[in-house]
Image (cartoon, rainbow, N blue to C red):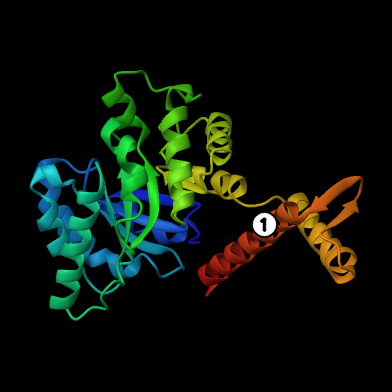
Amino acid sequence: MAVRRTDLYLPANNEHMIEKAPTRGADVITLDLEDAVPLSEKAAAREIAKRWIPKMSVNGAESWVRINAWDTDLTMDDLDAVVMEGLDGITLPKCSGPDDVKRLDFMLTDLEKKRALPVGGIKMAILIETAIGIMNVDQAVWCSDRLVAVIFGAVDYTRDMRVTRTDEADEQFFARGKIGVAARAAGLVAEDAPFPNYADDAAFEANTRSGAQLGFEGRQIIHPRQIPIAHKVYSPTPERVEWAKKITKAFEEEGLAKGSASVGVDGQMIDTPVYRDGLNILARVKEIEEKEAAKRK
């Protein structure tokens, strides 16, 4: 699984913000050509993105670009500008279903071949932010081997549903839950929506934890102050790691080694599913450690 605890979004027309991005410690940096850039600035933003794409990964972050949706007639100009060496991935907004995914995969393959880039090297994430996107997400996640993440867009989703977005996110429960399940079924990372109230750390952490309980393993970040909080929430706690080490060791040495698939640890019955949970936690820790090590190189 990719480590995408934090996906820092930056307007691609704002070089002042972009130049500081590699020092912020995010797992992914996404230069945004879509909502954060007015129409009059799109062309300039593409040129800035082209200059900065190779520099975003200098401290171990992945370098991504969010393009404009297919219905804007801007998508191909975006792809033509940013598909290049150093680009790790493309995020497609307003994804409504399988056809949108297949179309992007086809265009990326075509551009990679024309530009002598490794075919399939550029990854994809899809932004699900409409009612039709939610209804079709369980089909869309299977449509490209390039896919690594499914991202929820709460602001556009609540607008489309004609409901009020709240920090508590009760109105988003079904959508978040469906994205979490669809992503997990396909082996992808479920990435939560940005949290607009960036000055309220407590509300941000509470919202992040509620999403984590639905299967989200990262989220879009709109302010650097959110990064350490998200990293904490999406990383196993030291207590959880110690528990995982203890129960996997006991299961292997006191259980499996002696022909049993269950063993008692501190008054808790540890059987195969619990053991596998422990293994998953330890594997996640290893992935995160490797990601952090890459940032220090």
**Can the viewer see residue 105?**
yes
Tell me if residue 103 comes above or below residue 196 in the rendering. below
**Image quadrant of residue 64?**
bottom left
The picture quadrant where one finds residue 285 is bottom right
Q: Tell me which amino acid carries mark 1.
A: Ile
For this rendering, which residue is in front, 104 or 239?
A: 104
| Residue depicted at x 30% and y 23% | 161
Q: What residue sits 52% from the left and 49% below the top?
A: 217
Residue 178 location (% of width, % of height): 43, 37
Tell me the quarter of the picture where residue 165 sits. top left
Q: Is residue 3 above or below residue 170?
A: below
Where in the figure is residue 184, as x and y percent of width and height? 49, 50
Q: Secondary structure at mark 1?
A: helix
Q: Residue furthest front?
A: 259
Q: How many marks?
A: 1
In the image, what residue occupies the spot 51% across and 44% down? 216
108 vs 27, left or right, is left
- Front residue of 212/258: it is 258
Nearer to the camera, 233 or 50: 233
Residue 26 at what x, y percent from top left?
A: 47, 56
Label 1: how many Cα within 10 Å (few below 14, some 14–19, many 20+): many
Compared to residue 258, the image places residue 133 above or below, namely above
Residue carrying label 1 = 281
239 on left or right of 53: right
In this view, the residue farthest toward the top is: 163
Pinpoint residue 276: horizontal percent, then vertical percent: 69, 58
Nearer to the camera, 161 or 275: 275
Task: Say whether residue 26 is left or right of residue 279.
Answer: left
